[in-house]
Amino acid sequence: MRRAAAVLLVFAAALALAVALQVHGGAYEAEFSETMDESAHYVTGLLVHDWLQAGLPRPVSRFYYQFTQRYANAVIGHWPPGFYALQAAWMLLFGVARDSMMLLMAVVQAAFVTAAVWWGKRILPLPYALACGLLLLTAPLAQVSSRSLMGETPMALLVLAAAAVWRRYLQNGRAAASGAFGALASLALLTKGTGIVLAPLPPLTALFTGRARWLARGAFWLPAAIVVTLCGLWYARVPGALHEEVAWLGGLMFLPQRIPESLAFLTHQLTPLVAVASALGLALRLRDALRAEPLDPAWSVAAVMLAGSILFRAVVAVWEPRHLLMSLPWLLLFAADAARRALARAGSASRAFTGLCLIALLALAVWNITRTPPKARLGLHEAAGAILESPELAGIDVLVVSDLRGEGATTAEFAMRERRPGRRVLRASSVLAQTSFLGDQYQPKFRDAASLSRFLGSRGPLVVLLDAPPRPFPHTVLAREAISLNASGWRRVPDGAGAGGKVEIWLWEGQHGR
């Protein structure tokens, strides 16, 4: 009971601080706009929620088509279903509003930090484990991940949990622990493809810990059987599951520059001081292993997971720096171990050194908070609200003219705030142009403003939300020219100023008015 109470206390403290950091970063006011993917994750989770709420209607393809005809931002298939199942379950309990989704991310973040502290407590004194938790919670990458509806934090939590269970298997050799690792690895792979980072963990740790003979055990291979059973059908049969729209398996190639790039990124996240301590801690543990000193298998697990997260990014093109969130707990554990060794050698000066470390810890946490910029507000939340609140615009299709991030964020705003099924929210990047999945290979569908003006005028009543993104597509400029060219058919809707007047709302009324 005391252990459970301690875990709940750490979780509650982490949750409170995570919510405070979200508020500080503007998560509850900004759109789903941290990346292009964030709005797609929200709309896809909403699709699963609506399907469950409707009673699982069949055929699924018809429901999917009807939903995506209105909100063309759902991408299930390209990403596995795990994150969307989590979102949908949360939505059914707590609603679909932005505040609800940010609270979900805060809960996942708190669970991730609590798991890191729990792991650290197994191999280090409690104060060092708590220090790891504080630095993990306030690292800029962790702050950004917790205020974004993205899969990195759930993924990092599942990887950390799977690694902890594998450590248990290395300690007791029981099939139950091996099977639990397989189940958690499957959940990770069904949440995000980066769960593949767990694949090298069993064979490498068996070799590094002197358990190579375990490779002949059936229980050792139980996780592989579980993963193939639970994940094989998804990745083998679902269209897009192997990232075909981007690059097969994410673009397998060797990118050696990614290794120093990843190390530099992690150094920036943790600060050079902590990065040096991490490198020192890792080197000392490697020295201990070479001396054949008895080591908890947790250190081998940590080393393999750290190396794997960096090396996989060097061979998978779509593995972005934000995916390195799963690396932070391991780095912090090695840094804490180095600090523990230094304190043990301090002798009579240990009290002063402890005070200095505590001051440095708090200073680093505060600096991490101050150096993390707030979440960008695009002004599209206000513009969508102006359309939704206008009786004369009720039910009229909306064409969103922005960049890909703005289009997705606006689509999410309408899907979240109107009664579904609602109006069609059209993305200019597909209506006025052709692009690839990532927005490259761009080709406009209209050569001049006159042809675009005729096209817009032929669609009947239409609302155009005209944004001014930093790097507009050519069709964004053409759309503005097309409206000016046929000014008598368009009317500027008031109260659509958005952020500093950069977002305009126009209503097509026809050549002679409606």
Image: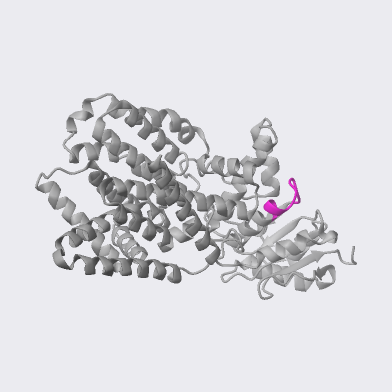
Is there any visible trace of residue 252 in the rendered image?
no
Quadrant in the picture for the N terminus: top left
Q: Can you tell which quarter of the image residue 493 is in?
A: bottom right
> In this figure, which colouring scheme has been used for the structure?
one colour
Q: Residue at left 34%, top 53%?
A: 329
Q: Residue at x 80, y 65 (%)?
A: 507
Residue 62, percent across and down?
Answer: 68, 36
Magenta segment boundaries in residue numbering? 414-423
Measured as percent of width and height from the top left, residue 220 is found at: 28, 29
The kind of secondary structure the magenta stretch mainly shows is loop
| Quadrant hosting residue 403 | bottom right
Identify which residue, 389 or 439, lies in the foreground.
389
| In this view, 416 is above or below 263 | above
Question: Which residue occupies the foreground of this view, 111 or 388?
Answer: 111
Left or right: 414, with 296 as reference point? right
- Up the image or down, 48 lies above or below 15; here it is above
Choose between 227 and 360: the one closer to the eye: 360
Q: Residue at x 70, y 55 (%)?
A: 414
Position of residue 217 relative to residue 414, above or below, is above
| Image position, residue 342 (x, y; %) | 18, 62
Quadrant in the rendering for residue 52: top right
Membership of 290 in magenta stretch: no
